[in-house]
Image: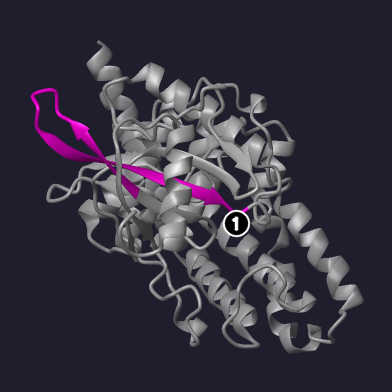
Amino acid sequence: MHESPKNGNRETARLLQKIGQAFGIPGPFFSCEEIKMGNVNRTYKVNYVVDDGEGTAHLKSYLAQRINTYAFRTPEQLMSNIEKVTGTLKRKAPGEVYLDFRHTAGGKNYIADETGFWRLCNFIPSVTFNTCSDPRVVRNAGKAFGHFQTMLSDFDASSLFCTIPDFHDTRVRYETLVRNLKDDPLGRAGEAEKEIDYLMSVRDLACRLTDLFRQGKLPLRVTHNDTKINNVLFEEGTFRPLTVIDLDTVMPGLAGHDFGDAIRFAANTVEEDCPDGDRATLDLNVFWAFTEGFLSETACSLTKNEVDSLAVSGFCLACELAVRFLNDYILGDKYFKISFPEHNLVRARCQIALSKDMLKKMDAMDALVQRYARKYADRKNTDEN
């Protein structure tokens, strides 16, 4: 889709011009195009003609997004979290590349009117990867998410809104599944008996992160909560990480939530909904690369308990997601989009197979975590001395 005031969808173009004006974008509007990124919000690249200061015109681009307020019920709180986090990042490292959200004349970083809930930020030329096994890219993704956490390591996470309550409280996720299994509104529990038995058998280990936090052994951090590789922008050609994007789920959380979710997604050898879910295994080389990148940035800011929790975090997050998929299946697929009736059951089976393989490789995973935690903590201490 390519739209401009002279061709294409004039109504959309006029709407985006109006949004740009409200955010004070200088220069005449030139064109717009929808960016097919993400499954929740509507995103448009909007282009303006600007003077380079020497009398030559060129295009400057921005991203305008209409937030899905069904998925994000408290968008003002979401934007408040983003404002606090991006403001802190820019103050700490003003020379780095970050998402920069424009403000209206009234000082807000969003617009809410009859057309929807809108925001507008800078467009960053870059490349992204939906999935990748290239160690260089995976390592740099780990560095990007690790850098994000380290830059915010002294930020008071409790000052952020919890926009999705109990998002990574695995105990609560299990308790919800148990209640829904008891009701079994569609009579589907019998089809998932094997999966239910396994998840219940590993319940305590799956809840390790939640339990450690409740016991006061893990600190609250600012976490991204959607640490897929496609949420990192890379420099074209060098694949140097530029910045982390998609900050809608930034909330208080645990370091292991971000690390474990990244591993659960990136190191899985099959797709998340592979019909032959038993083939799901952990790619130890991908784990290795991400771990090195992540700890090269975080080794000196994480506590010993946090470091010790990283290897098991992937298992915890795989089980938690399996519980969520299974719960949605029991209730009739109300949360996750499905393409066929057993889609969520297939997804749950894939995460279960992955978690089983993680248990087999747990010692190797922990050895890699400990190795790079020591390496980069020692390097920091050497540099300081």
User: For the point 39% across and 57% down, which residue is it?
Assistant: 364
Q: Is residue 154 above or below residue 342?
A: above
| Side of 79 where 65 appears, left or right | left
| Side of 105 where 298 appears, left or right | left
Q: Which residue is mark 1?
A: 316
The image position of residue 363, as x and y in percent, is 45, 56
| Side of 254 where 8 appears, left or right | left
Identify the residue at the far right of this view: 183
User: For the point 84% across and 84% down, which residue is it?
Assistant: 186
User: For the point 58% across and 32% down, which residue is it?
Assistant: 81
Most prominent secondary structure in the magenta stretch? strand
Which of the pair 364/231 is nearer the observer?
Answer: 231
Q: Is residue 216 above or below residue 130?
A: above
Q: Is residue 320 above or below residue 145?
A: below
Q: What stretch of residues is rendered in magenta?
A: 46-68
Question: Is residue 363 shown to the viewer in this render?
Answer: no
